[in-house]
Image (spheres, helix red, strand yellow):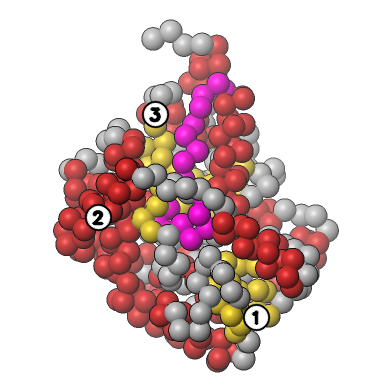
Amino acid sequence: MNLTETEQIIMNKRIAPPAPLGSYPPSDVTFLLKDLSNVSLERATQEREEAIQSGVHYSEMLPVEYQPTSGYIDLFHETLQDSSRKIALAVAVVSELIVAQRGLNTVLVSLARAGTPIGVLIKRYISYRYEVDLPHYSISIIRGKGIDENAVLYMLQKHGLDADLQFIDGWTGKGAIRQVLIAACDSFYNKYGIRLNDDLAVLADPGYCSATFGTREDYLIPSACLNSTVSGLMSRTVLRGDLIGPEEFHGAKFYKEWLDADVSNDFIEAICPHFPSVTEEALPITADLRQSPPEITWQGLQDIQCIQKFFGISDINLIKPGVGETTRVLLRRVPWKILVDSMDNPNLRHVMLLAKDRGVPVEIFPGLTYSCCGIIKPLKGESE
């Protein structure tokens, strides 16, 4: 094969190989992240707020990792028990779509960290259904900075310049990561002449900003309840010039000290046994989606902009759409109010209970695309 000058540059670029990271079996995922476990990156809330206010990017530091309460853990297990089959069906649908659209030579690329558990499930489903073990990586993507280019180059070096990368995330909210991915793929093409497919496969797409999804229903995906302890004990990703060299991956911390609290593999093992029973149900759903491709309307973002204007909220990032993000707002942020599509939506039972416990007002917002939205009380430093 005759390589162009740009292609030779890609193949010859020396990228540090990945170190073993995370609490998943190595057969489930390879984290293309630099291990920063021994670096002190956490900042107290007030210090972090002042830094963000002064212009420091959120990816240059980490919040003190939230340690879930027993009630929070109970919510995770209760939700997992109630929704495991429903999640398995959505995994089956999105996996069948990926295979139908991309074939069985695809490289699965989860976006750390919410995408990682979903990528593991998709890999497991395809292995069960098609007896093919697709490579699966987890890489960093950061709002305002883009995708980890070295991670992409590493995968192309390993799997060929024509490798078909399928990006994966957990769910869509406002669609910010989808927009970052689109821009990153355009930038990569302009720099290297290789067109990456910016399709983002997600378990749930309540924001109407992806064409490859398992469902557009807005319900609580249990992995949205927790942070590192359901994502292989990995922190959020970090990008800082003094820590990450020009040929290194974006960084992250591996919280080995929380192994006793880790439920990353519990989450996977609760869902995979349902695959045999959901496959036949998934096939006609997939066929319908293939026959009548769903429209990408960005309706969710339009909703958020409407809410922003209605309440006069200066920072759109204070509005957290969807059941998962609303749950997070109620459990570990400073909520102002919760907007719902209906007071009797069965997906909102736990949201209503949490709002009542915390004394947070709940209001109906007519015509909401999502089941609910959480609005954070305006505070300095909440702009990430």
Asked if 4 appears above or below 63 in the picture, the reply is: above
Residue 109 in view here: no
| Label 3 or label 2, whichever comes before in sequence order | 3
| Label 3 or label 1, whichever comes before in sequence order | 3
Please report the bounds of the magenta region as a residue range: 192-209
Residue 221: quarter of image: bottom left
Which quarter of the image is occupied by the C terminus? Answer: bottom right
Residue 146: quarter of image: top right
The picture places residue 120, in percent across and down from the top left corner, at 34, 53
Residue 183 in view here: yes
Residue type, label 1: Lys
The picture places residue 343, in percent across and down from the top left corner, at 50, 84
Residue 271: quarter of image: bottom left
**Depth check: 341 or 129 in front?**
341
Give the residue at mark 1: 337
Give the residue at mark 2: 282
Q: Residue at x 57, y 23 (%)?
A: 192
Q: Which one is in front in this view, the residue at disc 3 or the one at disc 1?
A: 1
Give the residue at mark 3: 163
Left or right of 379? Residue 258 is left
Q: Residue at x 42, y 36 (%)?
A: 165
| Label 1 or label 2, whichever comes before in sequence order | 2
The picture places residue 150, in percent across and down from the top left corner, at 54, 34
Magenta region, mostly helix, strand or loop? Answer: loop
